[in-house]
Image (spheres, coloured by chain):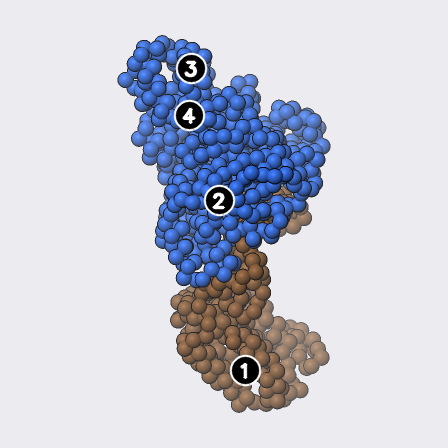
Chain colours: A blue, B brown
Amino acid sequence: MESNYKTGTVFFDNVSYKYEDTENPALENISFELSEGEFLAVMGPNGAGKTTLCFLLSGVCPGIWAGKIKGKINIFGKDPWVQPIYETARTVGIVLQDPETQLLMPGVDMELAFGPANFGVPKEEILMRTKNALEIVGLAGFEDRTPQELSGGQKQRVALAATWCMQPRLLVLDEPTSQLDPLGTVEVLDAIQQLKKEGKVTTIMITHKTEEIIDLADKILILRDGKSIDYGLTDEVLSRTKIIEENGVRPPDISQLFLKLQERFQVEPQISLYQGIGKIEALFKDRKLSVKKALPGGGKKELGEPILITENLSYSYKGYEHIKALKNINLKIYEGEFVGIIGQNGSGKTTLVKNFVGILQATEGNAFFRGEDLSKLDVSDVAKKVGMVLQNPDYQLFTISADKEIRFGLKNIGVPDEEIEDRVLEALRVVGLEKEYNTFPFRLSFGDRRKLAVATVLAMRPEILIMDEPTTAQDYWGRYLLADLAKDLFDKGLLKTVIMITHDMELVARFAKRLIVMADGEIIADGPTRDVFYQKDVLKRAFLKPPQMTQLASALQEYNIPQDVLSVEDMIHILS
Amino acid sequence: MHRMSPIAKLIYVLLTLPLVLIVTRTADILMLLVWLVYTLILWQFGKIKLRYLAKVFRLFLFVCIFIIVIQGFMYARVGLGESQTPLFKLPWSYQIAGGADLGVFTLEGFLFGIMIVVRVITAVCALPLLIMTTSPSKLLDGLTKVKVPFSFAFMLVTAIRFVPMVDATWSRIVEAQKLRAFNIDKMNFIKKAISAYIPITTPLVLILLRQANDLEIAIESRGFGAPEKRTFMEDVGIHAREIAFLAITVLVYAFCLWFKFNTGSFNTATLWVQILTVYIPMILQLLPF
């Protein structure tokens, strides 16, 4: 087929791709075109083919994963399909999701030199590029660090710098922030912004987070089930709020708000918070909008007895006795509470809950469950009282069928044989996996594996459920799956108390009635979620940003908007 | 020491090994001690603390005691004209071939045991000089320079990177299984060995396999395997410093061997054949010409 695309740009011309061992194509008839220096964001739900797109760009398909292709790929006049990966690597640099595995070398300087040294770039030149790249990503002077000494955000920036040292003309970023905390995310996005400013490099970035790319992307491509749903300039695509939402991409809160407002007024769709604030202010000035109602009080669930109490709880990790990971935590969590704990990585939130589940024992002070000292209990006793669901189920699943997976825990806590079967069935039913009784856990999707991990915990019938990052690695549709499940059990009274550790502000805004903010091993705020989000200085200290609607409320204080608005629903409620 | 070319240090380590291997008699302990002292002096240059030696001792303590006890009871070279001085006797006696009495702990055996321990320590102490004073980057370039295939040297260096990572994954899994009331830390040895590792190792292997996939992508997309001659980031050549170091090392080495020759009967011919056919070609091969 004759193509009228110029050389010297990056384009996909009707590209379809099918992996060797799958039935359905991973990508179907994908087309897009970028000129030099442009930035394309690729979005869509899980299984849309986003990563496959990255692999095609970087030559990983077919170099590592074989398959069949149709259509034409062009990257600055070259086709990654017909050359070895190292040839493609001269023009295409790729940064992956996991900060851990993509660093190959035991030192930052070696990491950065690895790529260019493979191509025989002279030493002086490599040293210059290394210095320059570290400056751009904000890590000047980090040459002698080892990966173990770096935070997630720093590791990811080293990966970016290492790719940058190879002077790629096309930079491919596969969800570079998906495994980072909010601070790390900001750091990496700033670094990407800097690279963009350096000019010339063309970038393709995959992401779930719409807010991230509003200021970065020139164009957006939305994929679903391997098909192209929408493609165009960023503003245009994001203004089509309905289409993107229907296809599993989360529109920014502000555009959701305008979508709702469009039902009542003639307003343009908005995608940036800053401009949105101006428009809303205008509506207020024209008296088209005003605050009509107060926020709903919320059906308050009666609080029962305190169920978890900590008294002067401190913890230091072995070998780091001089650093207190937790400093004098005094906390009371009651029966009937749905608690969110937020804070950056390293703020102590995970360390705190590990003290509740018998993984760690306080170095000073105590943690009590209904008056029993948790540090004196055996893990099998703790498991019957406090359950915890981890971020990644793959650290736990190991048997050949779902039912055996659940049995394992039950046997460990000594449930009588005749009762086990009932509990297994019940747990599978609760999480909606009753059909997967005999399935090999690794055949399940990631979401289902997480549900299975939840089932293994629930079968032990704990009174408290702790969830670590229940939204991680889930797309827009699946993000509240686990939280909804916990909420449901909580409402039915099967769980007395739920605690969620998360970086996801929308999640806490939606589910948690009580919010605890941690920083540097201390609790810096603790109270009803609405009140905590209102305390800007506290959030700033924890490097957290309140939800967009709270920011909007704060910008429009003079119009009597209550300052504790959390969500689009809240905002619409008070304005209607 | 840190700035020294890894090749020079590698030669030093490789010299140590035959020295340790040719030891046959208790008297050779002198030679070993000379080399050990030399090694420990080098440690000072390499800023390796002597405390580390205590660590090595502790690590091998059990083996050392075991060797000394065994040698004390079994050692006998009556046929070679050595006498036997009993230190103490067990209430029973059992003669074995060669003239040793398992019921008698001899002074000669005790000393021979000590000599073997010194031998082990000497060999072990040489390694930190290469490993602890050489950055992975220099190790990589050094190994590549002496014609170790790059992919092999690369594997070694990535191993340094990934050992702590595997370790971290292991502890995360152990913690994760504790949430299911599975506590491997509290199990006894037998229980652990029979079944307990399955819930830990299965996820570990599966996670590592997945990580290996990512790793492959990361390696290949960074130009691994490109036909260009790889850039050496480190100066690993032999310069004045290295020549001085090697000269001193060879001098001390010769002195050690002299001890060996002049303290009793030793088949000099065998040694010379060894030197000519094994060590010299080995050293020559290491020098990057």
Comes first in the chain, label 4 or label 2? 2
Q: Chain of mark 4?
A: A
Q: Position of residue A193 (x, y in %)?
A: 40, 40
Residue found 49% across the figure and 23% down from its top: A240
| Whether label 2 touches label 1, CB < 8 Å | no
Query: Does any portion of residue B135 appear in the rendered image?
Result: no
Q: Which residue is mark 4?
A: A271
Could you say whether the residue bearing mark 4 is in a helix, strand or loop? loop
Could you say whether the residue bearing mark 1 is in a helix, strand or loop? helix
Could you say whether the residue bearing mark 3 is in a helix, strand or loop? helix
Q: Which mark is residue A171?
A: 2
Residue situated in front as seen by the camera: A264 or A504: A264
Tell me the distance, in whole angstroms, between the alpha carbons under discs 2 and 1: 63 Å
Q: Which mark is residue B28?
A: 1
Are labels 2 and 1 on one chain? no
In the rendered structure, the answer to whether residue B52 lies left or right of residue B163 reads left
Three-letter residue code for mark 4: Ile
**Image quadrant assignment for residue B176:** top right
Are labels 2 and 3 on one chain? yes
Q: Position of residue A327 (x, y in %)?
A: 37, 39
